[in-house]
Structure formats: structure tokens, C-alpha cells
Image (cartoon, rainbow, N blue to C red):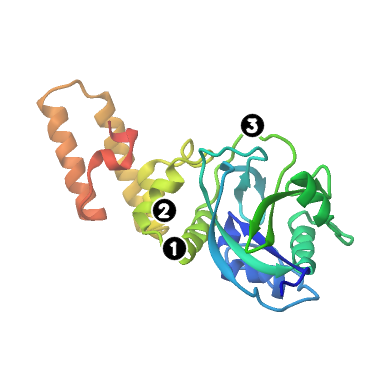
Amino acid sequence: MISEDLIWYAAYGSNLSEERFLYYINGGTPVGTTRNYTPCNDIIPPRETRPYELNFELFFARHADSWSGGIAFIDNVQDNEINTLAKLYLISKTQFNHLAKQETQTPGLVNIDFKEAENEGRTVFKRPSWYGLVLFLGHVENIPVFTLTEERTIESFTKPSEKYLMTIASGLRQTHNLSNDEIFHYFSKLKGVGEYYKFFELYDVVNGRINHAAEYMRIILDDYAKEYSRMPEGELKSQKKIDMENLMRQYYGEIRIDYLGEAFN
């Protein structure tokens, strides 16, 4: 028998990482952030987790001080051509309300009308708010699936921090068993990432290289790219490309110049 108190929460951002999500339940300050979360009255761990896909576009926008950059949202209009990777947590309605309270930094109690969300496809519990919209996504094993996003249409995008992307990458490995190359390609197509990250910078982030050596190598590669783009076609430019590819192989391993994007073309 299915408990009417249980729902699926579909996470698509940093909460893809189960370690990160559990701070909403247990309280505390997650690594990489400055924010302290209060524990939920119901601290039972998720009864089950599983991979999931959303037909809503994922992007990065706004600016969260706790993450020092843009954060993940999904569009509030469904698009069946899009597959955003997510993770389902089987939790209580009390826990989802507590999650929503903290995501929207609501001082009082949050009491979401789940029945309205299910009947109408959505419900707004706080406005204006970044995550004040609850979307109903259907049922999995007769249990309703819900997620949070912004009610307003977002048209400008913000660069997410390296630590934020690394947290999501951890969740993608955990939940969908993706390789670093697969995560790299997944991120590179998202609004808020493609405009602001050079591909070799993003490749470093996905591979966990966010140290001084990586920063130094990025400067070198960027200088190569700028010089290469200014050179006329000919033998010298061809040799420059070979030099850059050799440098990349030393740093990244076997990798082609075009794999890391337009900066080198």
C-alpha cells in the first residue's frame, strides 16, 4: 500500500548530489557554500532514489551568494524534445515543504497544495520567488512527482561557479553513471555555461582541476588561441595548431583541438 504522505522530488541542480540534498533534511552547511540549513522535523532518509529525465530545459540564472554565481533552473514550459537529467527522491510531503521553505528562504511555514499541483499541473506557493513554482511531472509507480522552479520566464543567464558545476557533476556520476566526457558535453550545451566557459575551462572543471596549475595552463592555452586566431592561413598557422595539440595531449591526454571548442578554430 502506497502512503499518501509520500511524493517523489525531482532534483536537477546541485541536489542531484545526494550528499548535498541531505543537508536539507539533516541541516548543516554543505561544502562549497556559506549557508547553514536548518534540519527538517522529519529526518528519515529518502525511502528510495532513482534516475529520471525531465522534458524541461535546464539553464543557469540569477546569482546566489551562497554559490558565488548562477544556479540551476528549468523552464516552466514543457518541451518534449529536451531531456534534462534529474534524480528522484522518495520523501514525505513534510520534507518537500521543508525543502521548498529553504529554497525560497521563507520565514514562516510552507504548506504546498499538492492536490492543486497535481490537478492543474502546477501551483505557486510564493511569489515573487526563484523557486516558488511547484511543477507536477506525472507519476512513477502511482506516486506523484514534483519539482521546483521559477514562475517567471527567465531570459538572461548567469555563469555558475566551478564548485557548483562540480557538485552537479558529482550527482550526474552518482545517479546516471556518466563519464567525465559525457558530463562535459551535457554541460557545454546549457545556457549560462556555453556563453561563459571556454571549453578547456569546462573540461578542467568536470575533471576536478580547479587549482593554480589548471589556471596557469588555461592562460597558456588562451594565449595560444588568441595568437592562432590572428594568424593568416599557411604553414605557420598549421604548425601553431600542431603545437597546441601537442600541448593539450601533454595536459589532457589524447584529445583533439576541435574537441575543446571554437576558441581554437
Name the residue rendered at 37%, 57% in the picture. 180
* Closer to the camera in the image, 6 or 155: 6
Residue 226 visible in the snapshot? yes
Q: Distance from label 2 to label 3 (Cα)?
A: 24 Å
Q: Residues within 10 Å of mark 3 (few under 14, many from 20)?
A: few
Q: Which is nearer the N-term, disc 1 or disc 2?
A: 1
The residue identified by callout 3 is 155
Q: Residues within 10 Å of mark 2 (few under 14, many from 20)?
A: many
The residue identified by callout 2 is 183
* Closer to the camera in the image, 50 or 196: 50
Q: Secondary structure at mark 3?
A: loop
Circles 1 and 2: CB atoms closer than 8 Å: yes
Q: Distance from label 1 to label 2 (Cα)?
A: 8 Å
Q: Which is nearer the N-term, disc 2 or disc 3?
A: 3
Amino acid type at image mark 2: Ile
Q: Quadrant of residue 228?
A: top left
**In the drawing, what numbered circle is on residue 173?**
1
x and y percentages locating residue 234 in the rendered image = 12, 23
